[in-house]
Image (cartoon, rainbow, N blue to C red):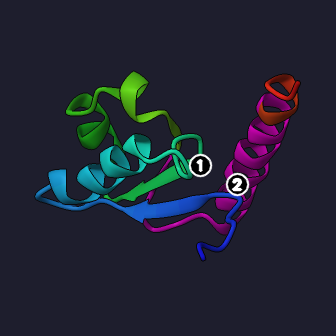
Amino acid sequence: KMESYAAMTVDVKPPYDQGLGLIREMRQERRTVSLPALVLSVTPEEVRQQTDQESLAIAGWLAKPLDEQRLLECLRRAVQHRRVAMRSNSP
């Protein structure tokens, strides 16, 4: 049985497709299609340019070295957004 997660972080480094490929796979699965994904990278702008952001639904982009406060803010925002979306989709 799969555990339930509020969000996940993905550390993306060259070659970028490895980390982004994981997110693409998640978007194909019913259980993880809407799981918020935060991307961590030394070069988030470079990764962002190579990404179809709409199809991957990236919840946030964080640069390294990681700012812990920014990570927590992004996580809170992503989880809150997901909860609102799930309530809106409930019958």
Q: Viewer-nearest of labels 2 and 1?
A: 1
User: Dot 2: what SS?
Assistant: helix
Res 84 label: none
**Side of 29 where 25 appears, left or right:** left
Q: Is residue 68 magenta?
A: yes
**Side of 33 where 24 appears, left or right:** left
Report the Cα–Cα distance between label 2 and label 1. Answer: 11 Å
User: Label 1: which residue?
Assistant: 35
Would you place residue 84 above or below residue 26 in this image? above
**Stretch in magenta:** 61-85
Q: Is residue 17 magenta?
A: no
User: Dot 1: what SS?
Assistant: loop
Rendered location of residue 32, percent (x, y)? 53, 51
Q: Quadrant of residue 34?
A: top right
Rendered location of residue 50, percent (x, y)? 20, 33
Rendered location of residue 35, percent (x, y)? 59, 49
Residue at 28% x, 58% y: name it: 19
